[in-house]
Image (spheres, helix red, strand yellow):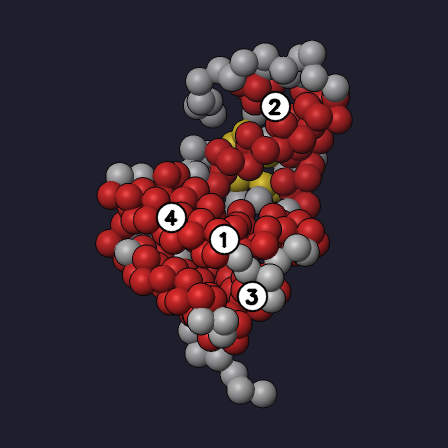
Amino acid sequence: MPIPARTPSARSTPRVLLRDLAHQRILGAIIDGTFTPGEKLNDNDLAAWLGVSRTPVREALAELGRQGLVEASPGKQTVVTPIDPVVVSEAARIVAALHAFACEEAADHLSPEIIQKLTNANASFALALDTEDPNIALTADDAFHNILVNASGNSLLAQTLETLMPYLRRAEHAHFSSTAARGSIEGHAAIIRALADGDAAAAARASRENWLTLHARIGSPRVSTTQRDD
């Protein structure tokens, strides 16, 4: 497997943290397409890339296997799994609902400063799209939505989203289009307007539509923006 440029050695880091570091770096490479679907991952190569022993690499790969992002058979190399549109669709629906919930929770204690942070973050997102770099654009999109996740005051919300977002971001990296993503600028603006007006329900609807519409454009045709009334 071709490996990215060598990272600074982390051998002085406690092993439990080395496992987390290895997981984070390999996960990031799967999400951004550095490691492509079907690519074989070699323990030794990964260890050399990360500057760690094979043990934290194996632990990280085991966790990625539990997430369904790699597959390993006894006696064989680990392989990056294909992007599963069904899983992506399911994750998109849950993520959209969770971000709508974040809007509802945050609306109760939003300050003018947070509204301004959202406005600034949306402007930064618009500039990020100009780069046509999915890493920059999707990082800026995360920054916007994370303001509301943090403002919700619900720590479990952030933890839950962290487990789901890799499925979405991986698909979005693979199908990224800055032109398609520009619709999110107005989607973000609609969220901000609703929150500024104190309309939590409208903000939640705008957030849900933003997530599902963006994903339908970029990631998976299976995702519908239609919301059930029951």
Q: Quadrant of the C terminus?
A: bottom right
Q: Residue at x 46, y 22 (%)?
A: 3
| Residue 143 point in image, percent of width and height | 47, 46
Q: Tell me which amino acid carries mark 2.
A: Asp
Which residue in the structure is indicated by mark 1?
114
The earlier-in-sequence mark between 2 and 3 is 2
The earlier-in-sequence mark between 3 and 4 is 3
Q: Look at discs 2 and 1 and give the one toward the viewer.
A: 1
Q: Tell me which amino acid carries mark 3.
A: Ala
* The disc label shown at residue 107, or none: 3
Which residue in the structure is indicated by mark 4?
120
Q: Tell me which amino acid carries mark 1.
A: Ile
Is residue 117 visible in the rendered structure shown here? Answer: yes
Q: Residue at x 32, y 49 (%)?
A: 123
Which residue in the structure is indicated by mark 2?
43
Q: Residue at x 56, y 65 (%)?
A: 107
3D distance between C-alphas at marks 2 and 4: 42 Å
- Vertical placement of residue 197 versus 33, above or below: below
